[in-house]
Amino acid sequence: MRLLIKGAVVYTMAEQGVVHADVLVQDGKIIAVAPGIAPEQEDQILHAEGMYLLPGLMDGHVHLGLMDMESGEISETTAPVTPDMEIEYSVDFASKDFTYCMKEGITSVCIIPGSSNIIGGKGIVVKTNCAEGKKEILNSYACMKAAMGGNPQSAFGRRGKAPATRMEILRQFRAYLEAVRLFTESGEREITSAYRRSELLAGVPVLEGKVPIKIHCTRHDMAAVMQVLKDFPVKYTLDHAWGTAPYVDQIAEAGCGVMFGPAGCYRGLGEGREIDFRDVRSLYEKGVEVAMISDAPLLSPESIIYEAGEAVSAGVPVEEALKMITLYPARWTGCEERIGSIEPGKDADLVLFNGLPARDVHARVMYTIISGNIVYKMMIEEEAKKIC
Amino acid sequence: MLIKGGTLHIGDGRILPDTDILVQNGKIAAIGTGLMDKEVIDASGKEVFPGFIDAADYAGCIDMAYHAHDYSENSSPVVPYVNIKHSVDPDEVERQEFYKSGITSMVMVPGNKNVIGGMAAVLKTTGININQMVVKEQAALKGSVINTVKETFGSRGVKPSTRMGMMNLLKETFAKYQKPEECGKLSYIEAKNRDIFQKVFAKEVPFVVAANTKAEIESVIEGLKPYDVKLAICNAYQAGQAKEAILEAKAAVILGEFSHMSSEVHYDTDFEAILELERQGIPVAISLLTDDNVLGRECLFWTVSKLKKAGAAEEQILRMLTVHPAEIFGIADVAGTLEVGKDADIVICCGNPIEACDAYVTETLIRGQMVYRKEEAVCC
């Protein structure tokens, strides 16, 4: 059976831009985006006049399903470099956080290890209907997680182990990448004593530029890591990226992505006091692709929508702000082929709002669709009455 | 100073287009049309609001440098006779830049770790020293019956380690200070505590108590039924579920912050029911306080968005940001609305931040002083 969504204002996040069009869905995929598509008899029709249709929202940096258990599952803190850890095995896919994500229009999330390790392991992208028993992993190696600065430093340094300083973090980070390079150049034979074979194998697609490194860093840690990465042909995102103002030009030149947030935090000391959405605007103006992150459950998952609104308040155009919670996170986690925009051929992960998020404060999810199935529906009063 | 030609949102539901506000000596001296003054802020095309009030927070008492956590005197679960004012670092408050979000007053409360945690104070959100910032000292007595208390004391083997332990201490303390003469000769500290409780029993100040769940809210209301006090429930995530008890007790509701650690997810907040409470006359305010932390200024408006999604009207939201907290904490004579005689705490916006995400604050005045002006503000 096909699903026809009629009459919405469609924010495609693709070449078509913003169009008043119908969207036709078959077998979990979008098959057409055009005005006035004629329904066939069997088609399920969703009347969406007056609503806004967006690609399913995505958060490119979360720890969902890792922190609502009693014991911590977020970081394998027995060693500072653990590239072959697979976060998939730590996630509780039945966590009610995922169901909540669907309700708020977030259809995909990139789940990653925490930031206690210099290199923490492999992140995955999963659709948020996983708690309904439909675990669909879009990318089982979406990124390699790394972390600079205070987190690895305190996780290990406080126990009298390395790294105890930032300089040691950068040394170990470079040493690992160099070992992977040596390993690759030698036809996967050269193994330095510091790393196991599986640890080096995990780094191969990273050095091939196929899997991005996702680097927890802020302020001067960004400058340091960008300098090291000049020597390696890798793709990467700077995650959190608080205190970006002095480094905007360097970031634009590096050609990396930025995952900004979580925002709305208490202004403590250090990087935490430098959360400023004017930086998001500066990055956008320099052509850097920025994605908004909630770091959920540290912030509630739908915070990415409010963050996109803050970016708009700081002067970013609404359509660009919406790309920050759809297209860009998909692109920088290797899922752009499947999700992130409304185009024929892509997964039918779609959200209908009663207003435009990041523009209208009242915008609320009316329907969430994952792989062509309506997984959440807001009960409107009149409609509820009809059913009664 | 004259704020000329703005659309005034008075706070009581009235909206006056193209109206002037005359500010003199830190107060609102006149509201009308065709007013004159030498110094003029052109507010034509802009929206003008009374300064917003964050109804519970301890920003400024955390002391990040030394992790001192000055907000909870957790050496004992019952400490009525401490004053949060003495823990505030004005520089740390300043760092939050509340005025950029139009927040001009905040209710500084002791944290949620103590069954009775001390006295709260209402402050302006900027000032060169704490005494200058104070709007009202001893504005409330603060308590808590949430998990944070159990986690703080139970883990040390000190009562309370359970909900019944918390309620037991709460009721015992109220009983003791209602009839202190039955307790024999009071020590110095007990006499001070009695003085504070006398204000609570005289309804001079509210008792603000953190209670998250339906059960906690109902327990507190039930436990304090014998006492005629002004009750306000903060961090009241399940206030909607406890609607009947709150209506019966006429307790005020202060919503906690929702983004931190997915609070809304885990407490299943019913925003529609909370809005219904407000429509039925319950004062409802919003805050940046979480169970064991405080969040940044932006989050106050993220809560506004949640309430809007649930169908809140603009004037209802504005009441929650202004009139209701002013009423709960007894500062309605100086704050909460744009009216002659009140402090000139005024927020001027490009666009309406209760309606549109692209709205932003262009100027903020506290007691008539311009504490914030956005550079390069080109208003629509």
Image: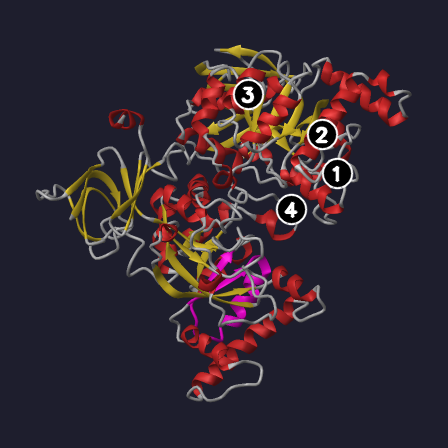
Q: Where is residue A350 in the image (x, y as percent from the top left)?
A: 28, 47
Q: Residue at x 34, y 58 (%)?
A: A136
Same chain under badges 4 and 1? The reply is: no
User: Badge 4 sits on which subunit?
Assistant: A
Q: Residue at x 13, y 44 (%)?
A: A43
Q: Residue B144: say if magenta.
A: no
- Type of amino acid under label 2: Asn
Residue numbers of the magenta segment: A212-240
Q: Nearer the viewer, mark 3 or mark 4?
A: 3
Same chain under badges 3 and 2? The reply is: yes
The residue singled out by tag 3 in the image is B246
- Type of amino acid under label 4: Gly
Q: What element carries label 3?
A: helix
The residue singled out by tag 1 in the image is B159
Same chain under badges 1 and 3? The reply is: yes
Q: Where is residue B326 in the image (x, y as percent from the top left)?
A: 60, 19
User: Badge 1 sits on which subunit?
Assistant: B
- Type of amino acid under label 3: Ile
| Residue A375 sits in quarter | top left
The residue singled out by tag 2 in the image is B168
